[in-house]
Amino acid sequence: GVPVADGILVDFRTDNGQVNPARSETKNGVAICTYTAGVRAGVATVTGEVMSLGISGSVGIMLRAKEASVVVVDANPYSIPADGNSVSQITATVLDSDGNFVQDGTVVTFRTNLGTFGPRLSNIQVVQATTINGQAIVGLRSLPKAGLASVVGFIDKDGDKVLDAGEPSDQAIVEIAAIAPGLTLSVDRLSIPADGVSLATIQATLRDSLGRVIDASGVVFSTNAGKLVNRDDSEAKNGVVRIQLQSDIVPGSATVVAVAKLDGAEARQSVNVVMNPLAVSLV
């Protein structure tokens, strides 16, 4: 086409940033302004309009986020059981100094002091993930150990996978909650004579949430009748402890209770043993 005459007024505007001048005259069919980037990452649109002719045109300019300046770490949920399998989703939101999401592919390093970022029963405490739409996401899996996991997400500027002073970071605390141990009780006799000497043997077996042996030496027994004697801890390291109930001379029912604790979580089981009256023979 043929350039318009000199001196035609063109009005410039943008939705992100500044244009200067906002109005310019054509010279040889061209009107010029200078665009100064805004602080919002994304596409900025610059429009030129000739109101006298009723025409306009636009151009898009891609504004990239600046380098990472802020990291916000969140966990969902904030509490998981110490079952070796439950997972909390850890999300790091990464922003530049103007509050824009950083570019996709920004690497975030995660570290934890408890739990694992890997598969069941692994021990992976450092992992990296890249951002998509400003967020990097990993999963923290519990181990069979209770406590508070401090999960830190940071921008590892020097690549050593260690949080250094000045590196943008944040942390989330995830409770890995204790699970009561698996406690089972068995008894070799459900009834004994109330003669003050007869015995019933009670066995306690202790396992963790994964079915693994727990030292049973900490199991505590009590009874409301009769007397507990002859405790045997010889197999405690294999998760088994035994004790005997010695009968009373008064007939009745004895409830033997066993209590075990693991990381503060308590398991309690009981068995009942009947102490029968002695048979009386009349001659």
Image (cartoon, rainbow, N blue to C red):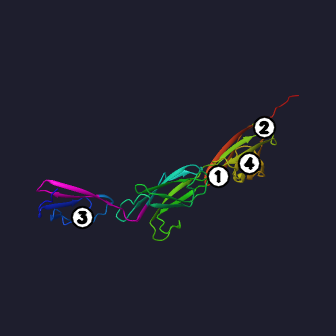
The residue nearer to you, when weighing 233 against 209, is 209
Q: Amino acid at mark 2?
A: Ile
Q: Is residue 169 above or below residue 205?
A: below
The residue positioned farthest toward the top in the image shown: 283
Q: CA distance from mark 3 to mark 2?
A: 95 Å
Tell me which label, 2 or 4, sits earlier in the chain: 2
Taking the image as drawn, is residue 131 in sight? yes
Q: Is residue 182 above or below residue 48?
A: above
Tell me which label, 1 or 4, sits earlier in the chain: 4
Q: Amino acid at mark 3?
A: Gln
The residue positioned farthest toward the front in the image shown: 1
- Mark 2, residue position: 192
The residue nearer to you, when weighing 19 against 279, is 19
Q: Amino acid at mark 4?
A: Val
Tell me which label, 2 or 1, sits earlier in the chain: 2
Q: Is residue 134 above or below residue 276?
A: below
Q: Is residue 31 left or right of residue 267?
A: left
Measured as percent of width and height from the top left, residue 241 is found at 74, 49
Q: CA distance from mark 2 to mark 1?
A: 30 Å
The residue nearer to you, when weighing 130 against 52, is 52
Classified by dominant secondary structure, the portion drawn in magenta counts as: strand
Which mark identifies residue 240? 4
Residue extent of the magenta highlight: 44-71
- Mark 3, residue position: 18
